[in-house]
Amino acid sequence: MLLTTCSAPRTSESPIQIAGYVATPVGEGSIGQPTVLPSVTPIPAVASPASTADVAAQDVTAAPLVGDLVPVAGVALAPDLQALATQMDDYLSLLAEQGNFSGAALVAYRGQFLVRKGYGLANQEQNLSAQPDTRFRLASVSKPFTAIVVLQMVQAGAVDLHESICTYLRDCPDTWAGITVHDLLAHTSGLQNYTDFLSFADVETSPATPDAVIARFRDLPLEFTPGSAYHYTNSNYVLLGKLIEDLTGQAYPDSMRDLLFQPLGMLNSGYDSGDGAILGGTRGYIGIGTAATPIDTSNLFSAGGLFSTVDDLYLFTQALDHQTLLSPDL
């Protein structure tokens, strides 16, 4: 539902304002003038620089105060909810005891937490318990965050969902001319999925730049005519991350921090640049006791390179539910 409505078309002659940024369409001078975001969570309308003072600022819906999204501590659950909470906790605890689950879970219902707890170990070698504030790689759960920032650009008039991606990408081969922004968001672009290539196993543990990732599928033929079929592919969301970079003039991690994580108070969320050190010890396992070889997440970029906690993800879902990130028609 989020991906089917197009806002007012982008105007090519004027800079556009996106949640604290003044960005200029590709090829029209300097872009991505950053402004300092406040430490509190509302996103204010930011005045344009003097050179563009005559440009009308785009309205940006303010994010709620974080405190408004957090259930009140100490409020007793109704008996039926308490029974459900106990049942869920018992089930997850049993899985953890059996070695079939380790991680964190958060379940909320109408402003009350039913479950907010860590289970098992985040790091077996260090005997590090999983907690609600334990950082985990999001993998493809990164995609909704990338999509939201693109849709904020749509809302601000910076991007037209049904415009060719070559309007916005600095490097765009002719093969991609028929692909729209909507096609990338909806996985209908026809791009080949580079993580399905046999060669991906040879590079997935080594660092890569966004341009190097894109080069793996840039010159390949499309699998189908854009818009004619659906095929889930990480390549789509890698290009969306590049679109964000080209329009804001910022690196993707910085844009996600400034446009989403800081405004929402998601202080334990960000971009894992590759080696997982920022996760604070969390690592993955195959079964019990066998440490998995971690992928270098720079190979996933904006399709799967973010990390977060269940507490922070709760803030994000509440912002979506309260329609504070996007207008209702998006």
Image (cartoon, rainbow, N blue to C red):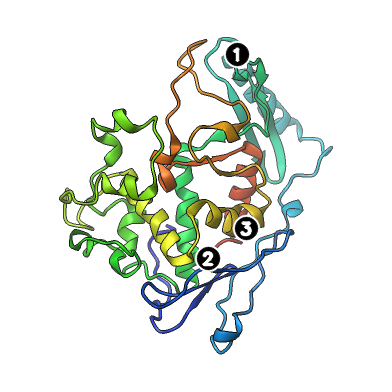
CA neighbours of label 2 inside 10 A, class few (<14), some (14 to 19), many (20+):
few
Question: Neighbour class for label 3 at 10 Å: few (<14), some, many (≥20)?
Answer: some
Q: Are marks 1 and 2 in contact (CB under 8 Å)?
A: no
Which circle's residue, 1 or 2, is located before the other in the chain?
1
Q: Nearer the viewer, mark 1 or mark 2?
A: 1
Q: Position of residue 27 (x, y in %)?
A: 36, 74
Q: Is residue 282 left or right of residue 180?
A: right
Q: Look at the numbered disc 2 and give the secondary structure of its residue.
A: loop
Residue 323 percent location from the top left of the image: 58, 60
Q: Could you tell me the amino acid type at mark 2? A: Pro
The residue at which mark 2 appears reads as 328
Location of residue 34 with respect to 87 vertically, above or below? below
Report the amino acid beneath label 3. Answer: His
Q: Position of residue 18 (x, y in %)?
A: 53, 69
| Nearest to N terminus: mark 1 or mark 3 | 1
Residue 62 in view of the camera: yes
Question: Furthest-bottom residue in view?
Answer: 54
Q: Is residue 262 shown above or below 17?
A: above
Q: Secondary structure at mark 1?
A: loop
Query: Residue 101 appears in which quarter of the rendering?
Result: top right
Q: Earlier in the sequence, mark 3 or mark 2?
A: 3
Q: Which residue reaches farthest right?
A: 74
Residue that label 3 marks = 322
Residue assigned mark 1: 125
- Residue at (47% x, 49% y) in the render: 144
